[in-house]
Amino acid sequence: MTAYVALLRGVNLVGKSTLKMSDLKAIADELKLEKARTYIASGNLLFLSDRKEEPLRCALQAALQAHMAKSVGVMLRTATEMGGVLKDNPFTDKPANQVQAFFMNEPPPTNLLETVRNQADDERIAIGAREVFVAYGEKGIGRSRLKIPAADAGTARNMNTVAKLAELAREMS
C-alpha cells in the first residue's frame, strides 16, 4: 500500500466551489481509498491505495466532478514525494508561511522563468520536480501581483502545510 496526498485545486468552505471535507472523505470512501482523512478545510486528502497515481487521480477527478458539477483539479503525491518537496524547498531562509509550493501534474516547462509576469524585486522563484517554489516578499501572497502561467492548473500550499502533510503521510506509510 502506498500513502498518498491528494491536493485539490480551487475548493473552499464558502462560495461557488464549496466542498465540505466530510463530502471529500465520503468520496474517498466510495472509491475504496483506505484510511482516508482530510487535513484542514482546503482540499487536502490523505489515504492509502495499491493503485497507481494516474488512475487514482482520474478517479478522484471524475468523482469530484460528479459531486460538484464542475471540474476540480487533483494533484497527487506519495508520502515520499511530499517529504521530497519539503526537503527540496530552496527558501528555508524565509518563514514557512511565506513560501508556497505550487503543485502540478507535470514537470514545469524549462522556460517557466521566462513566462513569469509581475515579479516583485523581493519575490524569488525556483523550479522543482513537479512543483514551483515561490518565496513571497514583503507584500506576501495576498497582495502579490506575481503571475506564473504554467502553474495556473496547479494548486499551492505553504510550507507549513506541506510539512504537516508530509508528516501525516509518512505516519500512514
Image: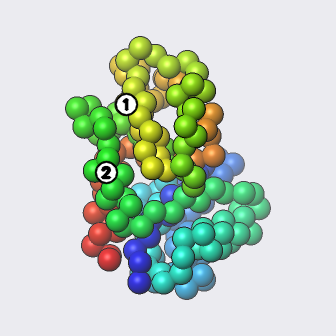
Q: Pick whichever, 131 or 24, lies toward us.
A: 131
Cβ atoms at labels 1 and 2 below 8 Å apart: no
Residue 59 vertical placement versus 126 (above, below): below
Left or right placement of residue 67 versus residue 164 in this view: right
Q: Residues within 10 Å of mark 2 (few under 14, many from 20)?
A: some
> What amino acid is at disc 1?
Ala
User: At 38% from the left edge and 61% from the top edge, which residue is drawn?
Assistant: 81
Q: Which residue is mark 2?
A: 86
* Residue for badge 1: 135
Occupied quadrant, residue 60: bottom right
Q: Quadrant of residue 117 in the image? A: top right
The colour scheme used here is: rainbow
The vertical placement of 58 against 145, above or below, is below
What element does badge 2 sit on? helix
| Label 1 residue SS | strand
Mark 2 belongs to which amino acid?
Leu
